[in-house]
Amino acid sequence: MCNSIIQIEVIIPTQTKYLDLIGSIGEHIAKELDEFSGDREALAYHLNLVLTEATVNAIKHGTLTNPGDTVRITINIQENELNIKVYDHGQGFDLESVPLPDFDQPKEGGMGIFFIRTLMDSVTYTRQGDCNVLEIIKHLS
């Protein structure tokens, strides 16, 4: 059981040059979970991918035309749960209407939500005040 609490908050400009930073935070977190008994390397890869995909979606689809916009990412680990929230200020979208990718005729883009849903345990997207919040949960037990 992972009793320690880890809380991380990152606020970045809406620029894709920060994606490597966000992904590497996920990797480092996975490698530091001392009491996680699963495959740490796989978890590190999954968190890098999920954080990168969620952030790129927030940058591409979730921001207004204001160059001063930011994306806020919070990562909380408590007990046996990892909780990621990605906040954006765009118009939002309907998570349930995102189609499955066409694996027979793959195109660039459109895979992020599929990967996030496949690799994580819970994905929700809600409006909270003036922000949209993509919440991703991974059970660590």
Image (spheres, grey):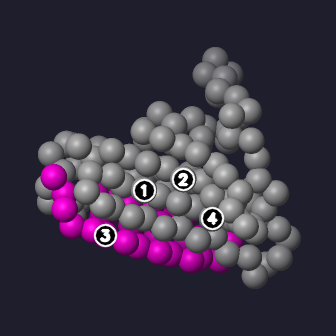
Q: Position of residue 51 (x, y in %)?
A: 49, 56
Q: Secondary structure at mark 1?
A: strand
Disc with the residue nearer the chain's start (2 vs 1) = 1
Q: Mark 2 or mark 3: which comes first in sequence?
A: 3
Q: Is residue 41 visible?
A: no
From the image, tell me which residue sits under label 1: 83
Range covered by the magenta-colored residues: 1-30
Residue at position x 19%, y 62% in the image: 3
Q: Give the alpha-carbon distance from disc 2 to disc 4, as whole Å.
A: 9 Å
Which residue corresponds to the image point at 65% horizontal and 27% vertical from the top-left? 100
Q: Secondary structure at mark 4?
A: strand
Amino acid type, label 3: Ile
Measured Cα–Cα span from mark 2 to mark 3: 17 Å
> Mark 2 sits on what residue?
135
Q: Is residue 85 above or below residue 136?
A: below
Numbered mark located on residue 87 in the image: 4
Q: Residue at x 43, y 65 (%)?
A: 75
First of labels 3, 1 by sequence position: 3
Q: Is residue 121 visible?
A: yes
View extreme (top): residue: 104
Q: Which mark is residue 6?
A: 3
Determine whether label 2 and label 4 are within 8 Å by CB.
no
Residue positioned 47% across, 33% down in the render = 118
Q: Secondary structure at mark 2?
A: strand
Q: In the rendered view, does 19 fall on the left or right side of 93?
A: left
Which of pointers 2 and 4 lies earlier in the amino acid sequence?
4
